[in-house]
Amino acid sequence: MSDGVLAPEDVARRAHSNGVTLWALTDHDILDGIPAARAQADALGMGFIAGVEISVTWSGHTVHIVGLNVDDGHADLREGLRAVRSGRSERAREMGRRLDAMGVENSYEGALAYVSNPALISRTHFARYLVSQGYCKNLQAVFSQYLGEGSPAYVPMQWSSLEQAVSWIHQSGGRAVIAHPGRYDYTPMQFDALFEIFRDLGGEGIEVITGSHTPEQYRQYADVARRYGFLASCGSDFHSPQEARIDLGRLPALPKDLTPIWHDWQ
Ligand code: AMP
Ligand code: MN
């Protein structure tokens, strides 16, 4: 319901046929896909965890905080996510203007054609449009030339604070997880501060194995989990069959000595 290509039911079917036994749907900043995902998982006899990936601004950069096992009907969580989403339309118009100025035509309208929910237009939708029009050969190239942090059409956003995101997740009964830490552009000192502050807020977990980590990063963040006492998580970061580096259910297992974030959910 955010920047994935498949419908929640189809993601459920794909996960199940790839052998997944416990699955979480974690759309960016929205819970609207949870009922359909849960119903399909139930129909297939696959365990289901309601999730969300919240956009956070911390120390000048975007960090994604995944909430797992949240109550998708919780009013404070829903209201918080609505506020996080609220700036996306205006930001998208500004991205469109900047891309226009760079000679990329009709990108706002083009991106909208890829959007399933107008409240959740993201850079990924622009990137798909640019690839479809031949401006770039793949999504990665769009982010490095146009839309990545520091690129000319990048429009900075003030998402939620780390404190708010963790608090919404906890209020709704979930566990908070730092998503794909290997993707953030922080110094080692900033990383240490992020992990410490997150732990002090009661943050429980960190993604060790994810579709956006290299094997070297699996080892690096396994060490972070050990050092900070975090539960370990595994996230595919799956957005579509064409774009995924690794398919649902195909990631390696977590290191045996780490405790999975789902240890008491099975
Ligand atoms: P947004 O929430 O609109 O800022 O978009 C964030 C999404 O853009 C992320 O969740 C990724 O799916 C995608 N993204 C960010 N950086 C890259 C990249 N370098 N290559 C491909 N996709 C990216
Ligand atoms: Mn993410």
Image (cartoon, helix red, strand yellow):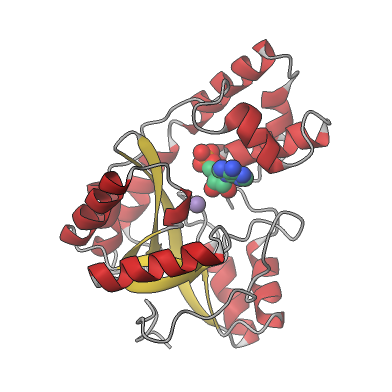
Farthest residue in the left direction? 200
Hey, which quadrant is residue 212 in on the image? Answer: bottom right
Front residue of 243/40: it is 243
- The residue at 70%/53% (across/down) is 5
Q: Position of residue 159 (x, y in %)?
A: 37, 37
Hey, which quadrant is residue 125 in on the image? Answer: top right
- The residue at 58%/75% (across/down) is 39
Front residue of 32/236: it is 236
Farthest residue in the top direction? 101
Left or right relative to 150: residue 110: right
Q: Position of residue 134 (x, y in %)?
A: 83, 31
Left or right relative to 52: residue 39: right
Is residue 207 among the parts visible in the rendering? no
- The residue at 44%/81% (across/down) is 255
Looking at the image, residue 90 lies above or below residue 35: above
Q: Position of residue 178 (x, y in %)?
A: 37, 58
Looking at the image, residue 246 lies above or below residue 58: below
Front residue of 119/264: it is 264
Is residue 140 among the parts visible in the rendering? yes
Looking at the image, residue 26 lies above or below residue 152: below
Q: Position of residue 92 (x, y in %)?
A: 56, 27
Which quadrant is the C terminus positioned in? Answer: bottom left
